[in-house]
Image (cartoon, rainbow, N blue to C red):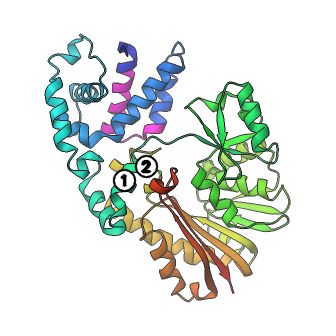
Amino acid sequence: MRLHRNLVFAVIDTLHLVFNEEKYADKEISKTLKRDKRWGSRDRAFIAETTYDIVRWKRLYSEIADVKAPYTRANLFRLFTVWATLKSIQIPDWPQFEDTPTRRIKGRFDELSQIRKYKESIPDWLDELGEKQLGKLWDKEINALNQQASVVLRTNRLKTNPKELQKRLDEEQIAVKLLSEYPDALELYERQDVFKTQAFKKGLFEVQDASSQKIAHALDVEEGMRVIDTCAGAGGKALHLAAIMKNKGQVIALDIYANKLKELKRRAKRAGAHNIETRHIDTTKVIKKLYDSADRVLIDAPCTGLGVLRRNPDAKWKLSLEFLKEITEKQSQILHQYSRMVKSGGKLVYATCSILPSENEKQIEKFLSTEEGNKFNLVKEQKILAHKSGYDGFYYAILSKK
């Protein structure tokens, strides 16, 4: 592979924003890719994948390069040098790459690969927490969460079916395979920009990880029901629920962020999902009005997002133990308050994209021991680990109201 100056500089500029200005990697990469219209798909893939790679392995590469935050431009080039050397890419004869110690880089890599916190490139606190909460599974799980995520699509059954969608995408030179254990899912053989396809523009699919697709099915919804998605965000799961319900009944999508609900409305229009009603939680009255009214309630709770590190590797550097403490308290409050929307005989599904028992089974255990939780029975819980499923780490619990 020959390195091109403008592409390498684009990576360095993006890394500066992510590492030094605490920006989100996905948003900054997206902005960078719009910078030069002459870049082809290979150029854009190089920028995105290289940036994500260096973000993912920041601690390991920093240790090898012997650099620390805040990163100067020279430091960022040193990180890039480590990346290129370990990928066996020839370093060009540019001033930024003078005196590259290739042998020392490889030797240091071999040495640090014996220590998990460097090998898996994670902060000390996270390594200790993972081992404490997951025990022997932590080794395999953090390794799986450091792999690049595959692209999975969810068929919009309001407009098509998986086999028909596969055929349509094939016509647009997008090769996908059906996933037998996931009724609506298709996986891309190789990464491509699916958002430019006619199939996407016509609302035939959404991009949604296979593990995430399990959540809507766990609600066991039927046509004509009233279903509430309490932390709907931009609505991936609300759209899935609307499709399973064949647009019959009502899906009420709630969120504290009005801009996310605006995005959901746009997506619902494209998907042809007519039974979704958005409500902005600007006061507690919005919640109280819905007490004892829903056949099904989904609490897709805010969480650390440790199960989705493969697609958000910069989260490793933004999370902290303080945040974990705050978020578990928030989850507890949400469970207590939002569970009241379930009517007698109805079902509640609590879900997170985390792998930590403190956010998952321990949270449910604690809830069931409260006065409000006493009104529910635990029907089923499932922990989805990335190293076993091959997809994102997730958890869900199905509770029925007595």
Q: Amino acid at mark 2?
A: Leu
Q: Residue at x 62, y 52 (%)?
A: 258
Q: Secondary structure at mark 1?
A: helix
**In this view of the protein, which residue sits in the foreground, 44 or 275?**
44
The answer, for residue 305, to whether it is visible in the render is no
Is 118 left or right of 268, judged from the image as shown? left
Where is mark 2, residue-wise?
A: 309
Is 17 left or right of 34, judged from the image as shown? left
Q: Residue at x 44, y 72 (%)?
A: 329
Q: Is residue 375 magenta?
A: no
Where is mark 1, residue-wise?
A: 142
The disc at residue 362 is: none
Q: Residue at x 71, y 31 (%)?
A: 169
**In this view of the protein, which residue sits in the foreground, 120 or 373?**
120
Occupied quadrant, residue 46: top left
Which residues are drawn in magenta?
Answer: 9-26
Q: Secondary structure at mark 2?
A: loop
Position in image of residue 224 (x %, y %): 85, 66
Q: CA distance from mark 1 to mark 2?
A: 9 Å
The answer, for residue 22, to whether it is visible in the render is yes
Instruction: Give the quadrant of the N terminus.
Output: top left
Marks 1 and 2, the one that precedes in the sequence: 1
Q: How many marks?
A: 2
Position in image of residue 55 (x %, y %): 35, 38
Badge 2 crowding class, 10 Å Cα cut-off, few under 14, some 14 to 19, many 20 or more, is: many
Q: Residue at x 47, y 54 (%)?
A: 386
